[in-house]
Image (tube, helix red, strand yellow):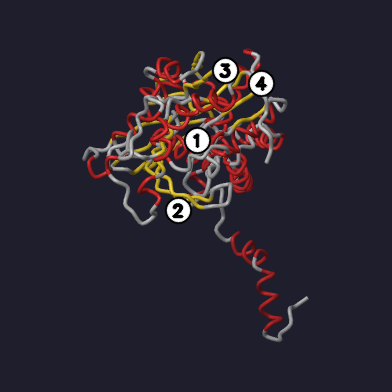
Amino acid sequence: MTAKPKVTKAVLAYSGGLDTSIIIPWLKNEYHCEVIAFAADVGQEAELDGLEEKALQSGASKLFVHDLRHEFLTEYAFPTLRAGALYERKYLLGTSFARPVIAKHQVEIALQEGADALSHGCTGKGNDQVRFELTYQALAPQMAVIAPWREWNITSREDAIEYAEEHMIPIRASKENIYSRDRNMWHFSHEGGQLEDPWLTPPKDIFGITVDPEDAPDKPVEVTLSFEEGWPFALDGQKMSPVDLVDALNTIGGEHGVGRVDLVENRLVGMKSRGIYEQPGATILSTAHKELEAITLDRSTLHYKDLIAQRYAELAYDGLWFVPLREALDAFVDSTQKTNSGDVRLKLYKGNCIVTGRRSPHSLYSEDFATFGASADYDHSDAKGFITLFGLPLKVSALLKAGGKSND
């Protein structure tokens, strides 16, 4: 068994949730070290209320809270949006790229405070432990890493709740409210408890930022999003900051039940897990962005970009944010987005996000070419030669199979 590192001061990535709340006294008891808590504001809203009092009451010497919402969107969420990255057909990667930005600032605080260890509350079964620790390795390889879930004898959330109760640590979780949740500006996720049965219909009361599509307004709402080189910047013609824009879309999308996802995903660590995701604003932005690319990118670039998008999604999901390949893919994406400017109009209705219009000054769509009617720019008879040459390999193969010969 590996010996425990000698630690004098540890910086804990702190959310105020069940796991990180009990980690503070556990670190002090097991490592006899000072514990500094760090909380990143990436859009949790009310979850940050009373956090300092709670952290200090749990035994932390101090708490740092950094507002990372703008950085989270502009340096992580929007680049992933521009790449078109989608993990396993549904997941817009809200938790995946939140971890690197949190870990990055955690490292900065540790260096600033002269700490010699970094700690997180991720379980030994999840993906987040990898995302945190790969960032640690990339930015502070000299520091010790303490992952309590891989050391202590707490084996379940029920055990964690009992530990909190024994040590009089204030928590929101209970044996009735057992779900593991993660919220930021890009999504709200729910896992654990009865959701671990993939046949179970998610309870209505589990959702936090979207209404049930059945209960959404009977009248749809239309919104228009504007992009400049793939960066979203305006809603219904009004320029907005990234934070205000995503806030507004989360509100509008949530009111109309947009962006609910029920996903059984393949975790990096080798098992399948079931998660419920609410991603209203991200869903609206992703739908609009892809639709704008449909008129601004040529066929070859669009199809190749889809291949890049899958690799980008895997890198983000696996926590490989600070790697040369991701930076190289960003350079490719930047090139594809130079002409991706324009507007997309969408209708939001009872869980649906329906595109109703798109336009761009760089549009490659030509009504004159596309029309089924008469066109001065396209001669229908040209198609015969194209089809003959394009299908020549098929014709040769068929003739050979039939024992015939092709004409020289």
The image quadrant that residue 326 belongs to is top right
Q: Quadrant of residue 21?
A: top left
Q: CA separation, marks 2 and 1?
A: 49 Å
Near mark 2 (Cα within 10 A), the count class, few <14, some 14-19 or many ≥20, is: few
Which residue is more in the foreground, 31 or 378?
31
Rounded to the nearest angstrom, the CA distance separating label 1 from label 3 is 28 Å
Q: CA distance from mark 4 to mark 2?
A: 72 Å
Element type at mark 4: loop
Image coordinates of residue 126 in percent, x first then y, are 53, 42
Quarter of the picture holding the N terminus: top right
Q: Nearer the viewer, mark 1 or mark 3?
A: 3
The kind of residue on which mark 1 rests is Thr
Q: CA distance from mark 1 to mark 4?
A: 26 Å
Badge 1 or badge 4: first in the primary sequence: 1
The local secondary structure at tag 3 comes to strand
Residue pictured at 24% horizontal, 45% vertical: 214
Which numbered disc flags the more N-terminal residue, 1 or 3?
3
Residue type for callout 3? Glu
Label 2, on which residue? 373
Provide residue 56's location: percent of width, then percent of height. Answer: 45, 16
Q: Around disc 4, counting alpha carbons within 10 Å, would you say few (fewer than 14), some (14 to 19), or many (20 or more)? A: some
Q: In the rendered image, which residue does mark 1 sit on?
A: 95
Q: Amino acid at mark 2?
A: Gly
Mark drawn on residue 196: none
The amino acid pointed to by label 4 is Asp
- Give the residue number, with chain letter if any, for mark 3: 34
The vertical placement of 241 against 319, above or below, is: above
Of tags 2 and 3, the one toward the viewer is 3
Mark 2 and mark 1 in contact? Answer it, CB < 8 Å: no
Q: Considering depth in this image, is 7 or 339 the residue closer to the camera?
A: 7
Local packing at callout 3 (Cα closer than 10 Å; few below 14, some 14-19, many 20+) is some
Q: Quadrant of residue 258?
A: top left
